[in-house]
Image (cartoon, coloured by chain):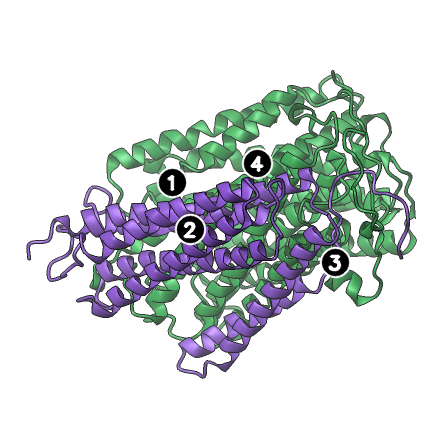
Amino acid sequence: MAYAASPSAHADHGHHHPTGWRRWVYSTNHKDIGTMYIVLSIFSALIGGGMSWMIRLELAEPGIQFIQDAQFYNVMVTAHGLLMVFFVVMPGLIGGFGNWFVPLMIGAPDMAFPRMNNVSFWLLAAALCLLVTAGLTGTGPGTGWTFYPPLSNSTFHSGPAVDFGILSLHLAGASSILGAINFITTILNMRTPGMTMHRMPLFVWSMLITAFLLLLAVPVLAGALTMLLTDRNFGTSFFAPEGGGDPVLWQHLFWFFGHPEVYIMIIPAFGIISQVVSTFSKKPVFGYLGMAYAMVSIGFIGFVVWAHHMYTVGLDVNTRAYFVLATMIIAVPTGIKIFSWLATMWGGSIEFKTPMLFATGFIALFVVGGVTGVVLANAGLDVQLQDTYYVIAHFHYVLSVAAVFALTTGFYYWIGKMSGRQYPETLGKIHFWLTFVGVNVLFFPQHFLGVAGMPRRIPDYPDAFAGWNMVSSIGALIVALGTLLFLFIIWRTLAAGRVAEANPWGVGATTLEWSVPSPAPFHTHEDLPRVSAQPAE
Amino acid sequence: MVTTEIKKHPWHMVEPSPWPFTGTVAGLLLAIGGVWFMHEGQPWVLLAGFAVLFATFFGWWRDVVREAERDHAHTPPVQHGLRMGMVLFIASEVMFFFAFFWAYFNASIPALSFAASPTWPPEGVVPLETWELPFLNTLILLTSGATVTYAHHAILAGERAKAFHGTLLTAVLGFLFLGFQAYEYGHAAFGIEDGIYSSTFYLATGFHGFHVFVGACFLAVCALRIRSGHFTPTQHVGFEAAAWYWHFVDVVWLFLFTCVYWWGSYGFKG
């Protein structure tokens, strides 16, 4: 052993295994906390997905279908965005899979700060309660997830709803910052002997980079939210022109957080896809170092492109030229990742089990969302496309499709390890095809609507946009069927799935989580594993 | 269930704990009570939130100290992780202040924003005198940076009395700084509702003052722990965290003094 045993004659407290409600509420176990995050993520996905379903029902045909109050429609849009970003994708990818598999993959017995890990989860649960409270207070916050003033100030949202929304994000932000500190410390400090940085699985790399983005971006949002709160309640004028303030300042601060935030949502997805593509191609990832440092580059550049969300607010031309260039540069490391995934598959012995189907679906659709991103990066074009459905289509391809595909990929890949039960393969494949067809029918026509000029965040639209909106809503119906099937698959897996082996995937699955039994025991790696070399080396 | 086997790794497997959940309850009470209070309601729920929050802080950190002192759970690798965690936390705090400095420069430098004031301070604002109380506070904080370093060296040398006095003096200087800040706020020519100058001034210096308060309390607790003999030359992570936090607060003040007080009143035509 590289380390002497603890000098205390004290019994090992790590074996304390509480039961009942205390096991969850008082938890200091990364697996239980990860499980709670995944449950919260699925729960929020059903609410947030229900809201998008209402949006698609309203937009299926021109005219008002059932939403009489446009403010209610705005609240649906706002809550859908906030739920999906802060309570579905982040808890699922980072809190869920990150918590479950980072310690397992680096050979650590738990996270660096197990107790703080638990407060990260519960603060997020409290934030979710506050967000629901916001939606039910008065007429709710109809600001969109970006909370732009003046719409979000006390003149246009005088009730407590927006204040609840702000405080919800404050708690979610505290949760994220503490979680980020935990992940960085765990990964930098607790790797098992022999697990050098350049031997870490790419999923661990992705979590490390994501945690740094969270650590440096979320506090800026906290500052901005605090200013909005004092503008609304204590008479400051940060964003109020009548007091010498600047509404555009909010957009700068928000997007200085918000752009890293979109990479916070997709980099963990990159990590999962790398593990899965490698496993089912039965080959190590092509260009491992390039893959790791491509994510590092994306993280760095992600901090200096925020104003591409603000091309139409009156920035001078030099500023816009810089942001166009910086934004387009991101396509380079992203391209490295896409081609390296393809090169990983090249010549591999590919097995299209459900996780691999979703992973290849991810790659294809992330490219679609990526190229529309390159289009939108151009300030000149963006003047036309800003706030149209083209933007909606772009970010739903990279979020609602790519990030959610990565969540689903992770679920099918690891559910056997987490629960000890394997999912039904045929149903999983049907789920993939339903979802894959559904999301494309749902989102691809929105490009056409956007180029034709259909604005976002409206409950009604001119007759000219009727056709593609109907197609889009039919796509939403297909996705909804896929979601119902997914819920059935979860139930079927947990109730009657066949018992999973320690490693159900064979020779391609080389990371440490496949070396422990399934379901993974309450405590793992109490005898620290020794890592000598990657199979690739 | 307790087993008798020896732990085979250096890491700290923390016992299940109620404090994360009570802390979350505190957060909910603070949020709901805060909204109620801000919308012309009673402050009781807000105050209950603070009460639960302080109870949580007390219980949580009491447990951390026990784990260090009684269980010897903080092996050298665990101490390394704790230090790393503190550095990362301070990094996140730096980014929080970054937002307020951004707001300040956005309002005061026309090159950064079309909405910036053409003169700074804006027309009609009477700023504070840079070289009176603000400069005295600068000297106080710089001195406190020296006294906390004195205490750190004393801990490393195992001289408990010197460490205690140095740490206590640092905390006292911190509270002295806060007293002068309170006096200054009370005598300023502008209130928080007087436009963008006072918005940026009070939020930036106010959050700094809050951090001074937290840092001084942290140091005061460290002083008590020194008196109880908690810190040894090889194990004093709690003190190091307090000292680093204090230096961070000090550096933020130097930026505030330079940018907000000095440069910020330079253009005043009184």
Tell me the distance, in whole angstroms, between the alpha carbons under discs 2 and 3: 29 Å
Chain letter for mark 2: B
Q: Residue furthest bottom?
A: B42
Residue hosting label 2: B96
Colour chain B appears in: purple
Q: For mark 3, does the 10 Å Cα neighbourhood hold few (<14), some (14 to 19), or many (20 or more) residues? A: many
Residue hosting label 1: A308
* Residue B181 placement (x, y as % from top left): 29, 62
* Residue A186 placement (x, y as % from top left): 66, 40
Task: Answer yes or no: are tags 3 and 1 on the same subunit.
Answer: yes
Task: Answer yes or no: are tags 2 and 3 on the same subunit.
Answer: no
* Residue A309 placement (x, y as % from top left): 39, 44
Q: Residue drawn at (44%, 38%), measured in percent from left and top?
A: A303
Q: Is residue B143 left or right of residue A507?
A: left
Task: Answer yes or no: are tags 2 and 1 on the same subunit.
Answer: no
User: In front here: A202 or A407?
Assistant: A202
Residue hosting label 4: A209
Tell me the distance, in whole angstroms, between the alpha carbons under discs 4 and 1: 22 Å
Secondary element at tag 1: helix
Residue hosting label 3: A27
Q: Which mark is residue A448?
A: none
